[in-house]
Amino acid sequence: MIGLHTVAEVRAAEEPLLAATPEGTLMHRAATGLATVCLRLLDRSYGVRVTALVGAGNNGGDALFAGAALAARGARVTAVLLSPDKAHPAGLAALRRAGGRVTTDGDSLDRADLVLDGIVGIGGSGGLRPAAAALVQRAASGPGLMIAVDLPSGVDADTGVVEGNAFPAQHTVTFGAVKPGLVVGAGRGCAGTVHLVDIGLDLPRASVHQLTDADVAARLRPPSSDDDKYSQGVIGIVAGSATYPGAGVLCTGAALRTRPGLVRYAGTAADGVRAAWPEAIVTEGRPSDAGRVQAWVAGPGMGTDDDARSVLSEVLATDLPVLVDADGLTMAAEQPDLIRRRSAPTVLTPHDREFARFGSDVGEDRIGAARRLAADLGAVVLLKGDATVVADPDGAAFVNATGTPWLATAGTGDVLSGIIGALLATDLPAAEAAAAGAHLHGRTGQLAAERGPLISGDLVRRLPDAISRVRGVPARGLGDSVV
């Protein structure tokens, strides 16, 4: 798993290392790593035109030392100083010794092959100031590859919040640890591909993680010679209705394709589910009529009338893991104690509007919002979005690294519910099942979107391919958003 670390955790890990090493050691490590990534991305160095946007402080120093390393390799480096009297003195001296040029105008941006963002680092707050924003806009309209130093300027390192303008990086070279703001919220859209440079920090165990394909593969247990249909997980599904059977069909299909041992369906969409999936055991009765299961999915497309409320209450009264989605969330928000008084694991899967029904908007800090609701209800909260966040009541969290904007279409949430429900039935911890399900769902969406727009049924069809892809990728230590 990839640990995501806050600014406070990074600063605390830097302190003893700064005290134990000669002055400038960490900056030189960071700058060397930055220059190495730049050279790899450019594929050459001699004659390459590099412009570094340099602010005050250490972030500007990192850019200056990296610029010096590139200049020593034959690059034509120009440093544009936003605060000339506060630029890092040693970094400036190193750049000049290497033959770099220093200026205060941005003319070199129009011809740059590469632009380094060393304006502000992880200690910055708020959007870019007007002068910096103008330079960044000019850089973005030019030909240069846009690379952020540690963090795109204008992005909050802990939350991904962007207040105003930010540097739109195609690549971010981050030092010591991946910061949450690089993979969640608006910051994810500004960071581009993230490259981690190890500078020797001894970091605490992270409370926020990203799963890799290898992590998910380890949680998708293949059947053994000793297994039968009851030993691989039995999932019960209450979804859809006679009028709108689609949610039941999609949720059941996704659960089947995720390979539990047995899928049982109970509800009024029985005819549609039976026609689509003869592999499922289908009943038109209540959940108690379905037979023994090891986890439940309840809510997608089931309506919010009195019968639906009674069925949801019945499922939540069991001592089994339950995933609640869609209409189930609407009803649970009206009676949150149905969730609070459960002792068995519960997973809630709201998007932003469904989240707000529980009493507060998501706001800009998506990890913090998911954690607060999880702690309040004693349930795992999967907050859907461009980077889905999963929070456990104890504060542990995951940020999903997979997906595609094409997943923003009707029915994809029903598929996600079926995937996670199937994983819950295999006795995975609820937060891990939710995080692994989100990763697999996103990976499936990426495969399904390879030929353009997708519909929800495409996800069900491509699930086996996604599982094979996840199992076939060797562990590299980093996921799609971090390479």
Image (tube, helix red, strand yellow):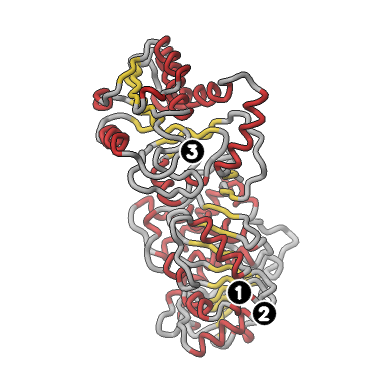
Pointer 1: what residue? 296
Q: How far apart are marks 2 and 3 (CA)?
A: 46 Å
The label nearer to you, 3 versus 1, is 3
Q: Is residue 27 visible?
A: yes
The residue sitting at 49% across, 58% down in the picture is: 441
What kind of residue is marked 1?
A: Trp
Q: What element carries label 3?
A: loop
Pointer 3: what residue? 122
Q: What element carries label 1?
A: strand
Q: How far apart are marks 3 and 1 (CA)?
A: 43 Å
Which sits in the foreground, 465 or 300?
300
What kind of residue is marked 3?
A: Ile
Q: In this view, does 230 lie above or below 214?
A: below
Mark 2 and mark 1 in contact (Cβ < 8 Å)? Answer: yes
x, y percent for residue 437: 55, 59
x, y percent for residue 430: 63, 63
Q: Can residue 274 be seen in this view?
A: no
x, y percent for residue 265: 56, 78
Label 3: how many residues lie within 10 Å, few (<14), some (14-19) or many (20+)?
many
Q: Is mark 2 on a helix, strand or loop?
A: loop
The residue sitting at 59% across, 41% down in the picture is: 474
Label 1: how many residues lie within 10 Å, few (<14), some (14-19) or many (20+)?
many
Quadrant in which the N terminus is drawn:
top right
The label nearer to you, 1 versus 2, is 2
Mark 1 and mark 3 in contact (Cβ < 8 Å)? Answer: no
Q: Residue furthest right?
A: 226
Q: How far apart are marks 1 and 2 (CA)?
A: 9 Å
The answer to whether 239 appears left or right of 374 in the picture is left
Chain-order first, disc 3 or disc 1: 3
Pointer 2: what residue? 318
Mark 3 and mark 2 in contact (Cβ < 8 Å)? Answer: no
